[in-house]
Amino acid sequence: MTKGEGRNLVLQADDDLKDWACYALRGVSRFALGVNVNEKMNRAVIFAELKGAERATFWCKKKKTEHRSNAVTLKMTELMVMLVPPAVPVLQGEPVALRCVVWGGPKLEKAVFYKDKKEIMNSGEGTYTITNATQDDVGNYSCHATYRFSHISAGAAQKEGDSDAQELKVIGGPPAAVISVSTKSLQCSCPRCPADCTSYHWYHTLFNDPQSHRRLSENHQSITVEEEGLYSCQFDCGKGFSRFSDSYSYKGTHTSIYMLF
């Protein structure tokens, strides 16, 4: 992100958030952060800023337990062109999108993407998508953008610029749960999970509020859906969890399963 900016990070957990605390690591110094908890939605917002550091890592932890969130690392740039990678390491086998964006929102005419300083894509699109991430995709990515501020002036001059390089990490992670569909009944399975993974968690997200992700009371392998929205599941293996399944979109009579990028 650019100098002086901040980002709102959202913390969600299956249980109450009152015992969670959040932190920032800037350089070698750790700082406690203020946490704004929305009890009705069971989520909290943390305002993340670099405060003069070139990069900082943010995470949350439940007090007196080993439960913690994923860590999010933010990096500062003073360039006009930015390559926007995922904020967290990519899980192997999952899709990932790298976006080439320009500060100020000009019209992007061309984007050239590079991996380890070698060109990998030249396109009028501003996104480079990896559909199935593997260890071969690990590396430092950057982009070169050609753009015009045509929303300010129709005759705006063409400009070009390079982004900073951003590291993409791919980790193994746990197996993923899978949803299968029969009419309005959903079934959760995990073919690659250990045999002791026998508990199920189901989640629902509203179409108009991606941050409304909430755990349902149902804990059986199958559920019947009534409310419109996105449904996902995961296995509870005692000392860990499977990955979330792909999202199932229920729109009354029309349904579909798709992956979130």
Image: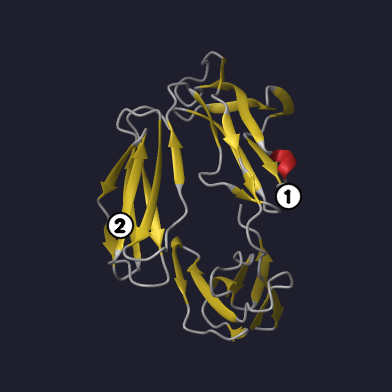
Disc nearest the viewer among 1 and 2: 2
Please give the label number shown on residue 215. none
Image-quadrant location for residue 19? bottom left
Please give the label number shown on residue 132. 1
Q: Which residue is mark 2?
A: 21
Q: Amino acid at mark 2?
A: Ala
Q: Quadrant of the N terminus?
A: top left
- Tell me the residue at 74%/73% (across/down): 191
Which residue is farthest top?
Answer: 157
Q: Position of residue 261 (x, y in %)?
A: 61, 52
- Tell me the residue at 63%/57% (across/down): 173
Q: Position of residue 89 (x, y in %)?
A: 57, 46
Indicate the secondary structure of the residue bearing disc 1.
Answer: loop
Q: Residue 66 or 251: which is nearer the viewer?
A: 66
Say above or below: 71 vs 190. Answer: above
- The residues bearing labels 1 and 2 have C-alpha atoms spaced at a distance of 34 Å
Q: Position of residue 35 (x, y in %)?
A: 27, 55
Indicate the secondary structure of the residue bearing disc 2.
Answer: strand
Query: Pointer 1 and pointer 2: residues touching (CB < 8 Å)?
Result: no
